[in-house]
Image (tube, grey):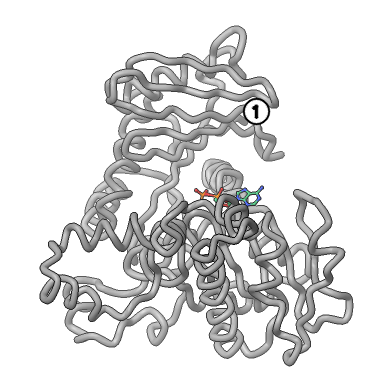
């Protein structure tokens, strides 16, 4: 069975085709600049890349171009589009309605639409992608996988904010958490690696967006992102935790419009805000090595925030089996892993320098054999998780 996985953004569609149940990637691609005149599609089958530039007015036309590419004689992976038997969609916000992935029907579409208020930047383009795929592929099963679903096991005392309770009751203002598909995927891999289901781990997804999750007995019990992805860790362009009074100070004393504060906290803060240079950790590493003090400062603030949450989540979990690093930074930046968990020897946690720095792209344990807690590097694969959910729901 072939499953198409779609991640639809406001002007882009990312996709992969999987051969299931094996989970083999048959092809992947990214269509960008939808509705901007000249759209650009990069499509890869194994190491062979092909590129197309064409005007694509909207997501429906985008899906048509992608399907034409999938059936293309030279670069395609299916002879007939009907070989694609199901589609899995990434959907950012499932609110309290979804604790797992679901087959999409009218009621599901309505609920995702209702949650557009809580995720105005993400749910509308996700919905556009679902509707475009339905328009083009007709009635094959489609599945929605929610970034929030894995975190629906977080208990009330951890998901409620200490603001008037009415705001939760009437407006559902609470911590939801995101990156759930990634935290769940690495948790399942860690269960496999540690040989048991009931694991207590801290998962650190450190990419452009960053979040950490406390996982107890294989279930999320707390996470750093909140009502929106802005809370928690320092990220590429997001501030993470700040004193909320900063917003009133900026608005009242400095007369900064709320819209600008919103943009500043989401797009101009974090690594780029502190360094003034880049949101990309690789660039900051290079600049810091050349002696740039602000680049070095941005890196140390980033690492300190992660370390602080490791401490917090150790207190939440008490018994701890592992700390998992994933995402572009978590998987690849050995030096940062040392800064984030190199001073935990009091708790008997020790990173192994040789294992930590060995070049590898696979799942591995980088702590010493004597370490009480395993420090693990697990490459995330949200698309594969979505493909498996889609397959499982279609086989039910
Ligand atoms: P996204 O969250 O957009 O999916 P990634 O998970 O790719 O992004 O993470 C992007 C971050 O990971 C950037 O800060 C980048 O510098 C860092 N990164 C990605 N690949 C590497 C690498 N090979 N070595 C070091 N850092 C990397």
Q: Which of 179 and 107 is in front in this view?
A: 179
On screen, residue 250 above or below 25: below
Q: Residue at x 55, y 33 (%)?
A: 16
Left or right: where does residue 323 sit relative to residue 132? right
User: What is the crowding at mark 1: few (fewer than 14 residues within 10 Å), some, or many (at least 20)?
Assistant: some
- Residue 99 appears in the figure: no
- Residue that numbered label 1 is attached to: 26
- Residue 378 drawn at (x, y percent): 70, 58
Q: Look at the image and tell me in which quarter the N terminus lies.
A: top right
Q: Which of 93 and 295 is in front in this view?
A: 295
- Residue 139 drawn at (x, y percent): 39, 29
SS state under label 1 = strand
Q: Nearer the viewer, residue 216 or 306?
A: 306
| Total number of numbered discs in the rendering | 1
Left or right: where does residue 237 sit relative to residue 384? left
- Residue 349 appears in the figure: yes
**CB of mark 1 near ligand 1 (< 8 Å):** no
């Amino acid at each position: 069975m072939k499953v198409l996985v779609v991640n639809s953004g406001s002007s882009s569609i990312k996709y992969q085709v999987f051969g299931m149940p094996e989970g083999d990637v048959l092809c992947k691609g990214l269509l960008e600049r939808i509705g901007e005149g000249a759209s650009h599609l990069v499509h890869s089958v194994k190491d062979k890349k092909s590129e197309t530039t064409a005007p694509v007015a909207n997501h429906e036309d985008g899906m048509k171009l992608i399907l034409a590419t999938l059936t293309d004689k030279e670069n395609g992976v299916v002879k007939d589009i009907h070989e694609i038997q199901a589609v899995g969609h990434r959907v950012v916000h499932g609110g309290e309605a979804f604790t797992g992935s679901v087959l999409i029907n009218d009621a599901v579409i309505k609920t995702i639409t209702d949650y557009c208020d809580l995720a105005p930047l993400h749910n509308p383009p996700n919905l556009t992608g679902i509707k475009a795929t339905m328009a083009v592929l007709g009635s094959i099963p489609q599945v929605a996988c929610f970034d929030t679903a894995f975190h629906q096991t977080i208990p009330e005392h951890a998901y409620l904010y200490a603001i008037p309770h009415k705001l939760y009751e009437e407006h559902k203002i609470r911590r939801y958490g995101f990156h759930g598909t990634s935290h769940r995927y690495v948790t399942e891999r860690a269960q496999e690696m540690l040989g048991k289901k009931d694991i207590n781990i801290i998962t650190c997804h450190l990419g452009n967006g960053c979040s950490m999750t406390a996982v107890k007995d294989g279930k999320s019990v707390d996470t750093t992102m909140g009502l929106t992805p802005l809370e928690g860790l320092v990220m590429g362009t997001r501030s993470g935790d700040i004193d909320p009074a900063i917003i009133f100070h900026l608005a009242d004393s400095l007369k900064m419009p709320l819209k600008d504060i919103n943009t500043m906290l989401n797009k101009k803060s974090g690594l780029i805000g502190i360094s003034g240079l880049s949101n990309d950790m690789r660039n900051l590493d290079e600049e810091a090595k050349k002696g740039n003090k602000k680049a070095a400062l941005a890196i140390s603030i980033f690492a300190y925030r992660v370390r602080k949450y490791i401490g917090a989540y150790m207190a939440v979990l008490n018994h701890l089996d592992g700390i998992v690093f994933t995402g572009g930074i978590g998987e690849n930046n050995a030096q940062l892993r040392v800064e984030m968990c190199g001073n935990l020897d009091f708790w008997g946690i020790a990173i192994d320098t040789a294992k930590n720095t060995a070049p590898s792209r696979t799942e591995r344990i980088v702590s010493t054999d004597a370490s009480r807690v395993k420090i693990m590097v697990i490459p995330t694969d949200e698309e594969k998780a979505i493909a498996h959910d889609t397959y499982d729901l279609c086989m039910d």
